[in-house]
Amino acid sequence: MNSETLRILDSIARDRNIDREILITDLEQAMISAARKHFNSLDLEEFGCEMDRLNGGLRIWRNLPEGGQEEIALSAMGRIPAQTAKQVMIQKFREEERNSLLEEFVKRQGELVTGAAQRYEGGALVVQVDRAEGFMPRSEQIPGEQFQPGDRVRCLILDVRDAGHQVKIVLSRAHPDFIRRLFEAEVPEVADRVIEIKAMSREPGFRTKLAVSSVDSKVDAVGACVGVRGSRIRNIVDELGGEKIDIVRWNESSQVLIANALKPAEVEEVSLCFELGRATIIVRDDQLSLAIGRRGQNVRLAARLTGWDVDILTPEEFSKGLATLEETVRPIEGVTDEMLDKMGALGLISVFDVEEVGPEMLETELQATPEIADAIVAACSDKAKIVAEQQAKDREEADRLAAEQSTEADALLSGGSSTDEASEAAADDILGGGGSQG
């Protein structure tokens, strides 16, 4: 071996990001293995090998029992040991490359990368990222998104696993952190931590909500994220294939934050029950469908963003719940107006809420006696059953009416054609008669 060997090792070390000294050590060990196989030796210490780091010269020797060393010529070892050395070297180089990949990509976990789509394997997308192949499971893909071989794929390095003989790099476009990294790439203020993404909720491919705040009062967090004429947010939406992104202003007050999170709907009032972790939102009738969103998406994402269980009511429903609660509780001996006011302030706005919190909470918060607290909960529990039955009947009646209206509409549509035909025939008769008279 000569300087050509060193050039090859240098090339491998550079291309595969492996330390040159490790490769040389692996080569020396491979030659020792070849010598042991050639001489049928089981002694691990019998042979030694050293490569000259300057000229690539390789020296192999045998440690003699009585001391000293016996030089072994490479040519004396024949082809079989050379093949053995080659196999050991390949195996060692693969291990070192795997270790190098593992070390590199573990450091890059959570990073935004751009790769090239290769193929689909069992629903998972295989992506070439730098010198490694990563895979994106179906669960980490945006629903409905398809890539062709060679397409550019921007994704997040979600996880890096040591899977025996290979390194598994898990990629994602569905994870919320993918959105976070896109904002860091598109909005310098987010990357510089001037603007902070405080909370996020996402349904990949459909909609994302972000709550942002600024540490600098001169920087408008929402405006900076949207960009001039929406330029910054448009780049992110285009990358996501049209997924809607709502950017809301963060507020330490849960009431203000929940109202912001339900935008574009206009919220009239927010009532919080800390005991149940529930927020009751009052919106006008014309804002109800907007607040709930398509298939409940808007309220669902707002609940995840804020960490509150969100109920949306119209003013009529809210007033009805309060009235029912007051009618149920007021007749109980010992219940005062002050207690009713406190219940409202605690976010207990229906008989269902009182039944759920139980008597202990009422004793503590209302300063009620155990007897009064038990009586309030018992009365509300009984009333809740009646209200639930009535609500079920109302729903059945509404469903029945809707079905009847649908049937009537179908009948009108099907009967309309015969009516039209009769009208057309009558018109023909009149016109025909008019023609004959003329």
Image (cartoon, rainbow, N blue to C red):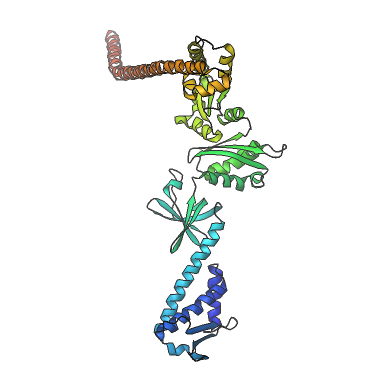
Whether residue 97 appears in this view of the structure is yes
Q: Residue furthest right?
A: 218
Question: Image height check: is 176 above or below 346?
Answer: below
Image check: 404 left or right of 134? left
State the image quarter where residue 177 is shown: top right
In this rendering, the answer to whether 25 lies above or below 321 is below
Residue 290, position as x, y percentages in the image: 51, 26
- Residue 21 image position (x, y, % from top left): 57, 74
**In the rendered picture of this protein, how many numbered marks are placed on residues?**
0
Residue occupying image coordinates x 43% and y 46%: 139
**Residue 39 at x, y percent in the picture:** 41, 86
**Residue 438 at x, y = what percent?**
30, 9
Name the foreground residue: 408 vs 77. 77
Would you place residue 106 above or below residue 184 in this image? Answer: below
Task: Please report the residue visible at 43 percent of the width from the left and 83 percent of the height from the top.
Answer: 36
| Quadrant of res 149 | bottom left
Furthest toward the top, the residue is 437
Of 314 and 161, the residue lying toward us? 161
Left or right of 255? Residue 82 is left
Instruction: Work out whether 180 lies above or below 250.
Output: below
Q: Quadrant of residue 426?
A: top left
Task: Please indicate, yes or no, whether residue 268 appears anywhere in the rendered image.
Answer: no
Residue at 55 percent of width and 82 percent of height:
51
